[in-house]
Image (cartoon, coloured by chain):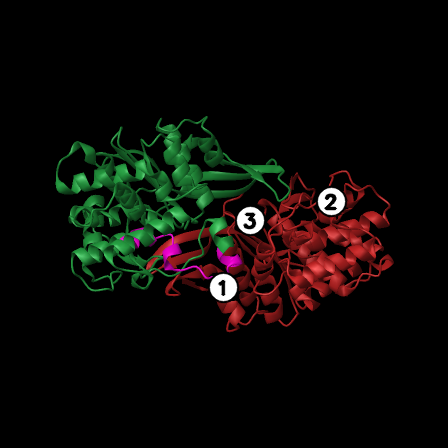
Chain colours: A red, B green
Amino acid sequence: MGKPVDLIEVWRGDLLECMHQGHAVVCDEAGQITHAWGDPETVIYSRSSCKMIQALPLVESGAADAYGLTEKQLALSCASHNGSAIHVDAVNAWMKDIGLGESDFRCGPQVPGDVDVRDALIRADEKPCRIHNNCSGKHSGFLTLTQHLKAGPDYTHIDHPVQIACKAAFEETTQETSPTYGIDGCSAPNFAGTVHGLARSMAFYASAHTRSDTRSKAAARLASAMMAYPEMVAGETRACTNLMRAMNGKVAVKTGAEGVFIAIIPEKRIGVALKITDGATRASEAAIAAILVKLGVLDAAHPTAKSLMAPDIRNWDGLVIGRINPVSALI
Amino acid sequence: MGKPVDLIEVWRGDLLECMHQGHAVVCDEAGQITHAWGDPETVIYSRSSCKMIQALPLVESGAADAYGLTEKQLALSCASHNGSAIHVDAVNAWMKDIGLGESDFRCGPQVPGDVDVRDALIRADEKPCRIHNNCSGKHSGFLTLTQHLKAGPDYTHIDHPVQIACKAAFEETTQETSPTYGIDGCSAPNFAGTVHGLARSMAFYASAHTRSDTRSKAAARLASAMMAYPEMVAGETRACTNLMRAMNGKVAVKTGAEGVFIAIIPEKRIGVALKITDGATRASEAAIAAILVKLGVLDAAHPTAKSLMAPDIRNWDGLVIGRINPVSALI
């Protein structure tokens, strides 16, 4: 783990109460670093921020077209969703189309992030299911590719053709050999790589629309799908959805657990990746917003930019008692 | 903010995924540091970890005895509770005794940490109230002292006699002048001080049973109450309650928001205070458990020690996919 730098301050009154450190890299289509904070060569798990890489085999294999997947479904295949009705209904419909159901999913049941859906389950005395798992869209993509490849049911196993294809997509777009992998919250393998490698992969996505090879066309379709359906990628109130809306669908962004965030900026053909060392989401959200403002693609005056980049901290009675600030080097 | 050191590692598979840094101090009854990690002179908010200091004026003023408060109520006055029935019922009974009610509280309404209570509120379509606020026991103490002093209703105001007394208790037991204060989650002032000062105050509590002055007797009563009623200080499944039970009521511990934890060890007359720089509770819990083991007051083999100090990380399907470890310097 490389030496991180201070990125996000948390103030209460006039005292700095907490500091979040991390690493961030902005990379152009040639893979060259244009901005960096901390150590770009730090090895991290990209977690859910690499879902568009995990969806690449689904598209480039021809499976997405063979099963007639819509752009909305492609966005969902890259999602860490809230388990809202729009997500759960879409996954259920998708599974009906391909003749599968909840028991085919290898992700565990998860309490949905959508509080209304959670409360409805509690009132009905029902438990959340695997479809509520924030990764069920990604797993729908895995299941579709599994069917297309006529492969076995254990699609999260490291030796399964789906994961072999995901690893190849990860290593080839990051242009690195992944040194190891971990098991993600949804039981799928998550391949380790450097922050630089992740930013390089995102720059590959950001420049994909300028190339005509099969992989680039697949990458461009996935990034476009995310930007066209931001509500499918996360959900109402979520940072990813709000940021993509605030940038009028011109930039794709994706969060990952434990403080990861990426951005794909097609108009500039650049990619961004960042990792907060302690894993805090409040810091990864503030940092990506600050970098998007710095890069000129997010308006600092937009309510979403203000609410993520330098939010007020309110207490249980609604009083503003502090604020979160990016450090000056990020602004 | 002084330079923190690595304290708690978060592993996923064979890769270090996150690191939590911080400061920790162990202090004897003379105020001398016996162990330190990071910078002991870092200024922090002790947040809820100093509730036994905020309860000191309640006892030493004579208010607690004038109102016939029980040891259980004294424990509750030092609590960050779950909003379980035992806490809410005790606060309601206390308020009935002194002729006050929910509208007199200055803490905001908070969703209770007790999931069963939360779910019951959702099923009944009821909102949480101010009594559910984790600090309502502390505020019951503030209200009791307010009545005793015949002071005005705005007991969280910095110039109110209750807060003037809290500031004096804080400065006199930490043996420092507090440079500033912030507003806490419950709207009460929270006085800033060094990690060393907080540990010095905790050593004052840990040695209070050896002295006979009014303040020391009050401090000893509060520490004893916390150790006698660990379930009143936090609640079922919570780190504070489980740790005090695991140490057979011989040590008082208290968490604070944004990564703070303290311990009062009467048998050794020492106090402990720590702050995780990024504010993570998973790290403050692991760090206090490791230090209590190191100091010989918590059995490393106790299930509570194992579950806090080096817990398995499980994913949504219950698979063990990683672990949290204190760094070797903490063991």
Q: Position of residue A85 (x, y in %)?
A: 66, 62
Which tag, 2 or 1, sits closer to the chain's start? Answer: 2
Q: Is residue B139 magenta?
A: yes
Q: Does label 3 or label 2 sit earlier along the sequence? A: 2
Rendered location of residue B61, percent (x, y): 15, 49
Amino acid type at circle 2 is Lys
Q: In which quarter of the image is the C terminus of chain B?
A: top left
Question: Do marks 2 and 1 share a chain?
Answer: yes
Residue range highlighted in magenta: B121-140
Instruction: Tell us which disc is closer to us: 3 or 1.
Output: 3
- Using a 10 Å C-alpha cutoff, classify the residue at mark 3 as few (fewer than 14 neighbours), some (14 to 19) or many (20 or more): many
Q: Residue drawn 49% across and 34% down?
A: B307
Q: Label 3 sits on what residue type?
A: Glu
Q: Which of A324 and B313 is in front in this view?
A: B313
Q: Is A70 situated left or right of B123 in this image?
A: right
Name the residue that disc number 2 marks: A167
**Chain to which mark 2 belongs:** A
Q: Which chain carries label 1?
A: A
Residue B164 in the figure: left or right of residue A321: left
Q: The disc numbered 3 marks a residue on which chain?
A: A
In the foreground, B19 or A131:
A131
**Which of the marked residues, 3 or 1, is nearer the chain's N terminus?**
3
Q: Looking at the image, do the residues carrying marks 2 and 1 touch, with CB atoms under 8 Å apart?
A: no
**In this picture, residue A85 sits left or right of residue B119:** right
Residue A258 is tagged as 3
Please, what secondary structure does the residue beneath circle 2 have?
A: helix
Tell me how far mark 2 sits from mark 1, CA to CA: 33 Å
Mark 3–mark 2 distance (CA, rounded to whole Å):
21 Å
The secondary element bearing badge 1 is classed as helix
